[in-house]
Image (tube, grey):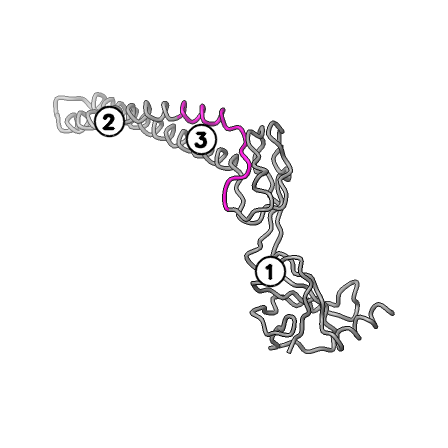
Amino acid sequence: MKKILWMLIGVFLFGYSAKVEPFDKFNIKASVGGKVIEANKDLEAKDVNEVIIKLDDTTEKIDIKNIQNQINILKEEIKNQEEIVKRKFETYKRYQKLKTKSLEEKNLKFYDYMAAKNQLLNLKSQLSNLIANKNKLKDIINKKNIKANGYIEKIFVNKGDYVAPGALVAVVDNIKKQKITIYVPISEDIKNKSVYINGKKSNFKIYKVWRVPDSEYITSYKVEIVGKGLKLGEIVKIDLK
């Protein structure tokens, strides 16, 4: 009770004091497993937009090369088969016009044409599957180059480690904006109020208001204020006017 009372007195006499924090914090997890071949820990404590961790993708690159060879061969086979289908269709059409040919002979040419066409469709299906497998491997390679966009707080893996899918590999902060959290008494109307920081009107705006009283400060709402230009970790005085 004393804690709540002193908090209310502090609000009315001094405004709100709070620490400036990153706008957001998020965990980076490995989408696929693999051996770490590069973990650029020199990027810790820096704001970056680049690959910070690389997993071994040797096998995937070999597989892609093999699949590409198969694709090239299959494309040539398809090209040849398309010509065969074309010729068989022309033969079939000619037979249909010949009165000297029996119905059985005409049907045989039709079945021959259809068999060639089905073979062509089968080759095209194989090509689609190969392309899909190649794209999956490219996606795996892309995921093995783990990229971060933000302030690198911590990289948890080292070169030579093996990471499993879903393993936490880094923590990154969004510091392009800053966030301040305060606790406002339920009785106070903060709608349409401007944010003053250390006595001066700021570019910070009320970002979120929890309308359910806070579990610790049971007579207050939790309020997040967001803006730019403050130092992270700085303790500032907030007034809502």
Q: Secondary structure at mark 2?
A: helix
* Residue 178: assigned label: 1
Q: Residue at x 52, y 34 (%)?
A: 144
Mark 3, residue position: 133
- Front residue of 64/7: it is 7
> Which one is earlier in the sequence, the residue at label 3 or at label 1?
3
Q: Nearer the viewer, mark 3 or mark 1?
A: 1
Q: Quadrant of residue 70?
A: top left
Is 178 positioned to the left or the right of 60 in the image? right
Q: Nearer the viewer, mark 3 or mark 2?
A: 3
Q: Are marks 3 and 1 in contact (CB under 8 Å)?
A: no
Is 153 positioned to the left or the right of 86 in the image? right
- Front residue of 60/231: it is 231
- Judge whether residue 63 is colored magenta: yes
Quick one: label 2, few (<14), some, or many (20+) residues within 10 Å?
Answer: many
- Front residue of 239/72: it is 239
Q: Which residues are magenta?
A: 49-67
Mark 2, residue position: 85
CA distance separating discs 1 and 2:
66 Å
Q: Which amino acid, mark 1? A: Gln
Q: Nearer the viewer, mark 1 or mark 2?
A: 1
- Judge whether residue 198 is colored magenta: no
* Residue 75: assigned label: none
CA distance separating discs 3 and 2:
27 Å
- Front residue of 34/39: it is 39
Quick one: label 3, few (<14), some, or many (20+) residues within 10 Å?
Answer: some
Residue 221 in percent (x, y) is at: 72, 69
Q: Residue at x 33, y 24 (%)?
A: 74
Q: Are marks 3 and 2 in contact (CB under 8 Å)?
A: no
